[in-house]
Image (cartoon, coloured by chain):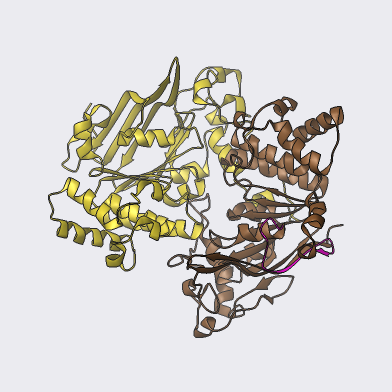
Amino acid sequence: MTGETLLSVQGLTKQFQTRNGTVKAVDGVSFDVKRGTIVGLVGESGSGKTTAGRCTLRLVEPNDGRIVFDGVDLRTLSEREMRAYRSRLQIIFQDPYSSLNPRLRVDQIIGEALDIHRPVRGSARRDRIAELLHRVGLNPDAARRYPHEFSGGQRQRIGIARALAVEPDFIVADEPVSALDVSVQAQVLNLIQDLQQDFGLTMLFIAHDLSVVEYLCDEVVVMYLGRVMERGPSREIYAMPRHPYTQALLSAAPLPDPAADRRRIVLKGDIPSPLDPPSGCVFRTRCRYAVEACAEIVPPLEDVGSNHHVACIRHGDPEVISQGLTL
Amino acid sequence: MTELPDDTVLRVSDLRTHFELGSRVAKSVDGVSFDVRRGETLAVVGESGSGKSVTSLSIMRLLSSPGRIVGGNILYRTSQGQVIDIATLPERKMRAVRGRELAMIFQEPMTSLNPLYTVGDQIVEMIRLHEPLSTADARRRARRMLELVEIPAADRRLDEYPHQMSGGMRQRVMIALALSCNPNLLIADEPTTALDVTIQAQILDLLRRLQREIGMSILFITHNLGVVAEIAHDVVVMYTGRVVEKSPVASLFAHQKHPYTRGLLACIPNASRDRGGAGERLRLNPIPGNVPPVTALPPGCSFAPRCSYRIPQCDEAPPLMAAGPSHLSRCWRHEAL
């Protein structure tokens, strides 16, 4: 089954009106997710990765673009029709403290999802909840307890059990391990992989931790100021990033090895205001390779082979290419 | 008691900071010792509940009730060369030390800057609190400080409020504020945790440059071993209020002599180690279980219940033992590692 495209996002755009003007949080984002794979969506604060993830599930209504899930453009569905799809599309949130209702017991939290999409009663319902808890590594007695009685890692497991309750095909995981301590993070990453393999799940994994994404994801989409800078197979992107932003981002991640010989590219300045993004390439104001043309042309995502796409007019320049090789 | 080797700025010995909650006592810091050498960076690394932040707040004497230093010394050499014990210094004298001799920066600069005053006013206030300068002179120094931390258009930025700046810019302001009275020792508590990686790289670069230029010593508190590898000369690894391993940075990353440190490094995903020949994912090796609360520590070695090297002797609490040149480990089996 792997290989077939389950989700295809095309030209996704979301604008927010603010007092000070329009913010294009997501600006023409396109990517595909093949069935049974994990695609990483990476970027720094303000890159639009979280909004893109929510638009994909229509939790935030996009202004434009197509979201083709299993052959159907989700944007053409009415609210009512969309509801039928909700059980196939789930989300896991970053903060396991604010994403669980503190007034509900764990069995109510998981049961609520079941009641809406996969209603079962009585002992079958209890068994199903116990099975889900077992599947995410929690004791069955967790069912009668409240979220505050659990640690961050355990709460994240509850959130995962809730998402799995409705047997989804596709999960958006929005920074699911960022709030956890490293030792617990590895436990949850192992769980995510097991579930992905056992249930053949397809995932969009939103993260800022580049080593987690390199390890977990089959493909990577790199965003900056609402646009995709580069996307492709993770192995290829990590071995040889072609976009100057990806190169800088990868070189900035601290490695737990003091002997590593790093050539760090330190970017100047901050991400520009999304209210007034630079013309042409949005990254040009911080790019060491920027030329005059970068201010005029919005660089299209170009295929550089093996499904690797780069949005940079200088991507073929030997200087830029060799930079990607020296990281 | 008031002796300190010449190259040492701060010596924490057997520090104990406890929180008394009714009949229960949380021994958040329980016998911690380390030295910070002049012009160097000591990183204190640990997960939530390790006591790393309480250690730094104890040194600044910023503990909130019911937290209290109940034992040990914090010897500090002032810029006049006098050695004082911060652990027992009267609060009135501490006020002259805090900010001037020892300065601190925090994880979230927004909560440590006052939102109602411009950054210029806040830096000027800090300078005038410790030094007899006119407002105009203090403002000139404030501008120089912003330039030192590479804030562009420093003159204009002085009149801005914290909310008008980005997270990276605010952390630079915090550093400028901290350094404005030329402290000997900067305590940085997770200063880059809330920042994006490209901004984190800028701030680490800045701290390294400032250390080189002004020769300040840094106590760097973090949970991120990648950041430790970048910035530290020496490393202290804490777990449940105790030091479990202490070593120069190169030696720590080359040979971990405590199973906890080894486990922490094994947990960080690393594609070249954790992916097989065909690119398939191998399982990560997490440390099982959770960090126990300091109010309910197991007897003996507090890491033993999660440790794969555990032997019966671990029921007895291990002391810090020599495990190599300048390398200490609180593990009975450090030789087997």
Residue A113 image position (x, y, % from top left): 76, 41
The answer to whether residue B215 is visible is: no
Q: Which chain is brown?
A: A
Residue A111 image position (x, y, % from top left): 76, 36
Residue reaching furthest top? B23
Left or right of A103? Residue B82 is: left
The answer to whether residue B32 is visible is: yes
Residue B333 image position (x, y, % from top left): 55, 27
Name the foreground residue: B107 vs A111: A111
Up-down: is A155 above or below B196? above
Residue B302 image position (x, y, % from top left): 53, 24
Which image quadrant is residue A74 in?
A: bottom right
Q: Give the position of the N terminus of chain A as an image quadrant.
A: bottom right
Instruction: Identify which residue is drawn at 63% across, 32% down.
Output: A103
Left or right of A15? Residue B323 is: left
Name the foreground residue: B17 vs A109: A109
Instruction: Identify which residue is drawn at 64% across, 47% down.
Output: A93
Up-down: is A269 above or below A190? below
Q: Which chain is yellow?
A: B
Q: Is residue B297 magenta?
A: no
Which image quadrant is residue A72 in?
A: bottom right
Left or right of B281? Residue B76 is: left
Q: Is residue A67 magenta?
A: yes
In the image, the segment drawn in magenta is: A58-73
